Image (tube, rainbow, N blue to C red):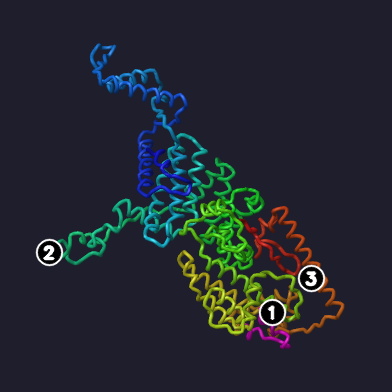
Amino acid sequence: PTACKFDLQRNIDDFMAEEDWRSTANYIRRIAKVLKENPKMRLSLMSADDVADMRISAEKEIKRERLSAKDEVLIDPNTGEVETFLQRQERVRAEAERGLDEAALNSVKVSGSLCVFMTRLEEEYNKSLQRLNPHTPEYVRRLKDEGVLLSTISEVQHYYEKVGMDAECAELSLLRIEHMYYKHDTIAKGVDKASAFAEKFGDSEMLHPACVVGGTEGGGDAQKVHPGAWSSKPDVSPEGVDTAAVIATLCRNCYEHGDDRAKTRAMLCHITHHAVHSRFRQARDLLLMSHLQDTISSSGDISTMILFNRMMVNVGLAAFRCGRVSDAHQCLTEIASSRVRELLAQGLSRFNGNDKNTEQEKAEKRRQVPFHMHINLDLIEACHLISAMLLEVPQMAQEKRNHGENNYYVKSRHFRKYSESYDRQVFTGPPEHTRDFVMTASKALMKGKWKECYDLIANLDVWQLVPGEGEVEKIRGVLLKEVKEQGLRTFLFAYSSNYDSLSLADLSAQFDLEPPQVHSVVSKMMMNWELTASWDGPTDTITVHRVEHTRLQTLALQTADKVSGLMDSNEKLLDARSGLYGFSDSDLGRSGGGWRDKGNNNRQRSGPVGGQRR
C-alpha cells in the first residue's frame, strides 16, 4: 500500500493529503520497527523473475477460484488426506524453505526501496508546506509532522547502517540535515519538547481544560476540584540533544559516502548551522577550505545555488552579530542589493522585464522555501545598510574634506544611492521603515551626533527576531562600540581642519570612549595617512598639521586613483571569468579584521565575497 499512496497524485504539483501522508509514515515506521526487532531480517528488491512468479501465482489463484465453484477436492500427496487451498500453499512454502540457507530464509523480497519511499515522503511534506497558507492553523498543524518525519528517517537510516548500505545512509543523512540545519538550538529544543508532548499525550487542543491549569489547593477532594487538575498541567522533559554534534556526524557521513551533490549540500548546511549559532570563524574556515565559491557556479543545480545564497546571507548576519562589520558587508552586499526574494527563493520575481514562460514559473514555484525557513528580509536590509553606513559615512566625510577626491573607493554604491535620494527629498518626515531609520542615523553620524545615531538603530524592532538568549543585548553592544569609533573617525575627518590641537581627554569624554581606545583609533588614522597630525606626549593632545598639496601632487593623486580604480575593475572582470569571486588560498590562515589584505592604503574593493547566485 505504500507505493500506491504515492501514485494517487495526478500531476507533479499535487501533494499527498495529510491523512494519506500520516498513514504512509506509519506504514514505514512499522516496517522499520519490525526490522529493528528482527536483526537478522533483510529486505531485498524483487527481480523480474520474482514479478513473473507473482503473476503466475495470481493466475493460479483465479483458476482455483473458478474450480472451487465445481467443488474440486485437493489431496495432500504425502498423507493422502484432503486439504484446503491455504493448507496447500503453506505446505508448498514449507517445502521450499527446507532447501534454503539462513540468509535466504531471513531475506524478504519487496517491490520498493525504503530509502526511495523516505525521499518521496519528504518531497510530499515539502510540497504541502509550499502550497499551504502559512498564516493558517493548518500550516502550524502540518509543521508538527516534521518530528514524525525526522524520527522515521532516523529509524530507516539505522537499518541501512546495520546492513552496511553506505550510499543510502548518506542520502538519508542529507534529508535529516536539511530539516535541522536552519534551526537555532533554542527553537530546536522547543520543537523537540512539543513533539515529545504530542507523542505522549496527543494533541494539546484535545486536553480537558482542567488539565491545562496548574495545581490546585483542593487536593483529592472531587467535590471541590475536577480530578483532571489534581496532577497539574502535563509536561515532558525530553533528553537534551547536542545538535551541533549530530549535524557534524551526519555531514561526515555525507562527505565519506555521498555523491558530489550530497557533499556540496551537506557542506552548505553545515556552514549555515555554524552561522546561525554565531560561530563565524568556523563557518568562514569551512567555506574557505571547501572552495565552494569556486565550483558553485558550475554545479548546474539551481536549488543548490539557492542554498549557497542562503548560506552567504547567514554568514553575513553571523559576522554582523560578532562585530565584523566589513565581513558582514562583503557577504550581504551582492544579494541584498538586488532581487533578494528571488535569490533566496522566498518569493517570485515581480519586475517588468520578466520573460519567463509558464513552465519556468512553475519550476520556480517548486523551488520556493517553506515559510518557516524564511530569513527575514527586514533583518537582512538592516544589517546590510548599517554595516554599509559604518563603512561609508567616515569615507564620505573624508571625501568631503578632500573636495571629492578618492571617490573611486566606494564600498557600497547601494548605500550611496539611498543617501543621495534621501538628500534630494524636499521634506523628510519621521522615519517609518528600516531604511528610513538607517538613513536618518547616517545623517546624525555625519554631524558627529553618535548618541542619536545609536538610539535610532539600536531600537529597531527587527532585533527581536534574532534567536538566542542575550543576542539582542550583544548586538546593541556591538552597535554601540562601532558607532562610537566611527563617530570619532567621522568627527576628525569633518572638523579636524578647524582645530590646531585636540585633547585626548576631551575626545574621550565626547565619544564616551576609554583614552586607550581613542589613542588606538587616532593612531591608526595617522599611520594610514588619513589624518595629518601627530601626538604630543607630555600634554596628551593631537597636533593637527595643515598640509596643502601642490598642483602637481593633486594631479598625481588623481592619476593614481584613476589607475587604481581601473585595476580594480580589471580584477573584478578577471574574477568573474575565473570564478574566484575575491577568494584566494592565502586567506585561509589570515586572522586579521578582513578576509583579504587590500594593500593600497587599507582600502577595500567593493566586490562581493560570494557572488550572486540565481
Q: Residue 383, can we see it? A: yes
x, y percent for residue 522: 68, 77
Q: In this view, does 44 lie to the left or right of 213?
A: right
Q: Splitting the image into 4 quarters, where does residue 144 fall? A: bottom left
- Residue displayed at 75% across by 65% down: 599
- Please name the residue that numbered disc 1 is placed on: 397
Secondary structure under tag 3 reads: helix
x, y percent for residue 610: 64, 58
Tell me which secondary structure the magenta stretch mostly adopts. Answer: helix
Instruction: Provide the residue span drawn in magenta.
Output: 489-507
**Of 186 and 69, which appears nearest the observer?**
69
Task: Determine the CA span between mark 1 and mark 2.
Answer: 78 Å
- Residue displayed at 56% across by 49% down: 265
x, y percent for residue 34: 35, 36
Mark 1 or mark 2, earlier in chain? 2
Quick check: 205 above or below 41? below
- The crowding category of the residue bearing disc 1, from other C-alpha atoms within 10 Å (few below 14, some 14 to 19, many at least 20), is many
- The crowding category of the residue bearing disc 2, from other C-alpha atoms within 10 Å (few below 14, some 14 to 19, many at least 20), is few
- Please name the residue that numbered disc 3 is placed on: 561
Question: Is residue 492 in the magenta section?
Answer: yes
- The crowding category of the residue bearing disc 3, from other C-alpha atoms within 10 Å (few below 14, some 14 to 19, many at least 20), is some
The number of discs equals: 3
Task: Determine the CA span between mark 3 and mark 1.
Answer: 18 Å
Mark linked to residue 223: 2
Secondary structure under tag 2 reads: loop
Label 3 is placed on what type of residue? Asp
Task: Determine the CA span between mark 2 and mark 3.
Answer: 89 Å
